[in-house]
Amino acid sequence: MWRKLVQSTPASCANYTRELQLLHFWLFLGIYLAALLGNGLIITTIACDHRLHTPMYFFLLNLSVLDLGCISTTVPKSMANSLWDTRAISYLGCAAQVFLFAFLVIAEYSLLTIMAYDRYVAICQPLHYGTLLGSRACVHMAAAAWGTAFLNSLLHTINTFSLPLCKGNAVDQFFCEIPPLLKLSCSHAYLSEIGLLVVSFSFHFGCFIFIVVSYVQIFRAVLRIPSVQGRHKAFSTCIPHLAVVSLFVSTGMFSYLKPPSISSPSLDLVVTVLYSVVPPAVNPLIYSMRNKELKNALKNLILEVVFQQQ
């Protein structure tokens, strides 16, 4: 078994120069700092403002924690490799990346499904909102999302790293992920992991159908609201979540389901950056742009901090 693996980089090519390495470092550093700032502000604002202690913001806080974990799993190591002019990662480090990334992505997708249910109940069954989404129910649903993701990612990681790597040790990606690792395994040995991936895909497809059906019902209910102001308020709580789901699902599906005929190392790297790095940095912006409650709470928190220092 290989003790070290070699990762690709977002700008990998035959004439990979030091300038491109530094460009990669500064680009990823900017995205990473934006993700830290945006998600950190959302977590702090929701935690400190008791008016935001509602199911919708509880799930948003969980989403921000997952986004921070997801981008912290992949980007710092890639930046360090570019800065120190290396592409090596230890075998255990690669396994940790596979486990953490799978865990966080699966938990985030499950949480986005729960957030669709939250919007459905809030708009289509508002009289039952307090019953169906009480504090205990919210905690149980969030725990189910995290627990399911943990077990799923553990199975994937154990199964993937039990396979013999007989096709070299160069991972065609800037972080360790299951599909590039399967390409390194013996052709007769990875069928069990493919079966597990099919089961996971079926689960994710079921979540996707649930989200679509929920929003069909939501839009039908919103269009029946007589006042324009009421429709606008209902849409304003749904559009950020729908935008995040669309970005997450579209980039992920394109990365995993694109036909081999259009696949290339450069395209694979770009698409992977789009679904693994961009959403954690963009999600806070999407949620804060159309959310007056969150913006007002953040403004009040900043003013409170500033006045306390004076």
Image: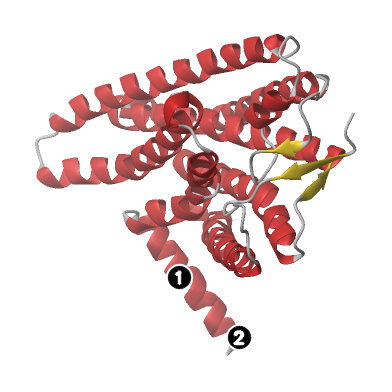
Residue 76 higher or lower than 108, as above or below: below
Give the structural element (helix, strand or loop) at label 2. Answer: helix
Left or right of 103 on screen, residue 130 = left
Q: Is residue 132 something that shows in the picture?
A: no
Tell me which label, 2 or 1, sits earlier in the chain. Answer: 1
Disc 2 marks a residue whose amino acid type is Gln
Disc 1 marks a residue whose amino acid type is Asn
- The residue sitting at 71% across, 14% down in the picture is 187
Residue marked by disc 1? 300
Closest to the observer, 254 or 170: 170
Residue 222 higher or lower than 26, as above or below: above
Left or right of 166 on screen, residue 67 = left
Closest to the observer, 171 or 72: 171
- The residue sitting at 30% across, 27% down in the picture is 215
Neighbor class of circle 1 (other Cα within 10 Å; few <14, some 14-19, many 20+) is some
Where residue 138 sits: x, y (%)? 55, 31
Residue 194 higher or lower than 130, as above or below: above
Q: Is residue 234 something that shows in the picture?
A: yes
Where residue 67 sits: x, y (%)? 57, 47
Neighbor class of circle 2 (other Cα within 10 Å; few <14, some 14-19, many 20+) is few
Left or right of 250 on screen, residue 123 = left
Residue marked by disc 2? 309
CA gap, disc 2 to disc 1? 14 Å
Where residue 100 sits: x, y (%)? 71, 37
- The residue sitting at 59% across, 62% down in the picture is 24
Where residue 221 sits: x, y (%)? 20, 27
Location of the C terminus by quadrant is bottom right
Which colour assignment does the render follow? secondary structure
Give the structural element (helix, strand or loop) at label 1. Answer: helix
Left or right of 14 on screen, residue 255 = left
